[in-house]
Image (spheres, rainbow, N blue to C red):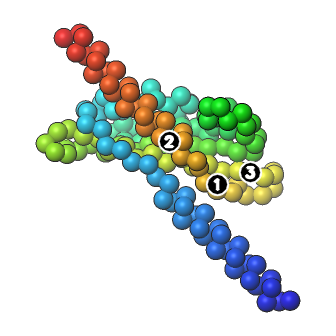
Amino acid sequence: MVGVFSLVGCETMKKEERINNAIEKSVFTRVYFASYESVWRAAQLALKYPISVNNMDNGVLETDWVRALEGFSPPGSGKIPSSGIRYKIALNMVKGRSQGRESVRVTLRKNLERQRDFFSDPEQMLTDSLEENVILYRIERELIIQDALRKVGD
């Protein structure tokens, strides 16, 4: 009987390790060929949540904790998320040069957690990666709009 419990314990640890590894790998990166200031502004416009960290010098843009009920829901899903789920989105930006052009690498991470009850610690969850891809797409669209407006103004 002791052997059965030790096998269950090992399996639980393996599952937690797999989830933690998947969470660490769930970082989204995209390179934009635009000025750092333009990408920064586009990222601020793309994030529709209250900002807690807005440090342009260090390239860090982070939202407050957002309750899943008040945040993003996939179109047509019809599912109401649990009230115990909340998340925070963090963007890191690094400017550089790629292929002889000015570029900015944007790294996005969504920290998703579930609070089962008042006494337990929050449990890290995997994201479906839909919102992350939508945010990166919005940044790209904002850059296209900024470029078009600049061309019209010239």
Q: Quadrant of residue 43?
A: top left
Question: Marks 1 and 2, Cα distance to the nearest angstrom?
Answer: 15 Å
Q: Which residue is mark 3?
A: 115
Q: Secondary structure at mark 1?
A: loop
Q: Which residue is mark 2?
A: 132
The amino acid marked with disc number 3 is Gln
Callout 3–callout 1 Cβ contact below 8 Å: no
Q: Quadrant of residue 36?
A: top left
Q: Which residue is mark 1?
A: 125
Q: Circle 2: is it few (<14), some (14-19), or many (20+) Cα within 10 Å? A: some
Direction from residue 78 to residue 56 in the image, left or right: left
Q: Circle 3: is it few (<14), some (14-19), or many (20+) Cα within 10 Å? A: some
The amino acid marked with disc number 1 is Met
Q: How many marks?
A: 3
Callout 1–callout 2 Cβ contact below 8 Å: no
**Where residue 57 sits: x, y (%)?**
33, 39
Q: Nearer the viewer, residue 68 or 90?
A: 68
**Where residue 65 sits: x, y (%)?**
62, 40
Q: Who comes first in sequence, dot 3 or dot 1?
A: 3
Residue drawn 44% across and 30% down?
A: 138
Residue 43 visible (yes or no): no
If the image is split into quadrants, where does the N terminus sit?
Answer: bottom right
Q: Secondary structure at mark 3?
A: loop
Q: Secondary structure at mark 2?
A: helix
The amino acid marked with disc number 2 is Glu
Residue drawn 71% across and 73% down?
A: 12
Question: With respect to residue 100, does 142 lie above or below?
Answer: above
